[in-house]
Amino acid sequence: MHVKTIAIHDFKGIEHCQLTFKPGFNLIIGENGKGKTSLLEALAIGISGFLSGVHGGGIHPRNIQSEEARTSYVLQGDGAYEPQYSWPHIDMNAEVAGSPYEWERAKDSYGAQTKTMPRDICHLAEQMVADTSAVLPVICYQSAGRVWSQKRKKQTSTFARKKSSRIAGYIDCVTDESSMKLMLEWCSRMEQIAWQTDKPVREYEAVKQAVATAMTKLEGASVAIFYDKRSEELLYQKGSAVMPISALSAGYQSLIWMVFDIAYRMAVLNPFLTERITETPGLILIDELDVHLHPRWQWHVIDVLRHVFPNVQFIATTHSPIIIASAKDVWCIDIENLASPKAAMSGYGLEVDYILRRIQNSADLPASVAAQLEAFYGAIDREDFTTAKEALTKLEHDIGPDSPLAVKARERLELELALSEG
């Protein structure tokens, strides 16, 4: 499964927007408020055309909400504004199970249901679910609040029952909230089966290994993940140190739970793949890929995700210059002008400062420091060394004499003074 194009009409603040995607990793870049999250939400609604054909088991497609209609206001009289609603429709073009499909998801009035037309994509999903040998695509939306926004545990546990359908891998897959409790219930169930059969459950071991592989590549040290039956928690082991994942920092949890969520869904959807569950194809949407991640991890997170899940199409948003600079063989989309998005200049291998200035149109220094440097080097160019010394003194006071910028400026002044005296 991979999305080729999406055309969005009258969704939230988007009047019209069409985007083209590639297989592999896609990165949407743009300033805050440009619509990155709205684009991912529209993609979640669009791909829910497939989920509309998955019936039962608590599967809920992401539908268009009435408040997501694009709203404009018309002045009535001198002081009243009347809202005018334009109802959303989202056109999808995707390849699913090796064949091309096109469909629209639309809502045409306040009380209307979201419709999927034509229904071919729904029928395909029905057929794939009915075929026990079919590889079901993983679908997952990772919101920006993925660490702290948790789905409340339901009264009836999905995995507490002895039998559960593999379509449980689609539960809450396109909601803003994660299903951590559901994942832990599944872990508990797999541990119970392993104990009863006296042998490892291969797809379960593959899920833990997926997380361990991702974290080992990021940490540069061997990592293991295992389930503790006494505390009913997943534990994180690095060397001799062992901690509950729930006790780790937000950065650790953000990445660990994201990888675990994707791998767990793959295992539930396609358990017959056993240790090869991470070869499952599908679509993963990630809002703010860089959220909570240390800069050192930001340099590697794209490569890690592609390594662990090689057959997945990723569509992620970011405004991190490090993520952009690390994006090798990534399809980058600039939405500075949402009505006319364009393929962005590849940032791979560029200096972070350059990306801030030239791609993101942002400053790479505080304005006051930039002004002081401009004053210093302007004085150097004019050979006004008295003013240059004053500017350097102020710069050293503000950023410290050992700052690389201050050291460089001081060396330049010393060189210019030596040349002028020679």
Image: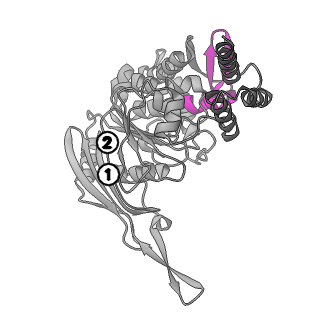
Q: Considering only order in the chain, which callout, 1 or 2, is on the residue closer to the N terminus?
A: 1
Tag 2 and tag 1, C-beta contact below 8 Å? yes
- Quadrant housing residue 17: bottom left
Q: Is residue 61 magenta?
A: no
Q: What type is the residue that disc 2 sits on?
A: Phe
Residue at 58% over, 33% down: 254
The residue lying furthest to the bottom in this view is 77
Left or right for 226, reference 84: right
Question: Which of these two is toward me, 182 or 11?
Answer: 11
Q: Is residue 117 above or below residue 186?
A: below
Q: Position of residue 363 (x, y in %)?
A: 58, 39
Q: x%, y% of residue 42?
A: 41, 54
Secondary structure under tag 2 reads: loop
**Horizontal relation, residue 392 to residue 308: left or right:** right
Label 1 packing within 10 angstroms: few (<14), some (14-19), many (20+): many
For disc 2, the neighbor class at 10 Å (few under 14, some 14 to 19, many from 20) is many
Instruction: Answer with the quarter of the image where residue 266 lies.
Output: top left
Q: Is residue 189 visible?
A: no
Q: Is residue 231 magenta?
A: yes
Q: Which amino acid is tagged 1?
A: Ile
Task: Report the Cα–Cα distance between label 2 and label 1.
Answer: 8 Å
Q: Mark 1 sits on what residue? A: 6
Q: Disc 2 marks which residue?
A: 21
Residue displayed at 36% across by 49% down: 341
Residue 64 lies, in percent from the top left, at 43, 61
Along the viewing direction, whichever of 198 and 314 lies nearer the viewer? 314
- Magenta span covers which residues? 228-256
Q: Nearer the viewer, residue 189 or 93?
A: 93
Residue 28: x percent and y percent?
43, 42
Instruction: Give the quadrant of the N terminus.
Output: top left
The quarter holding residue 87 reads bottom left
Dividing the image into 4 quarters, which one contains the C terminus?
top right
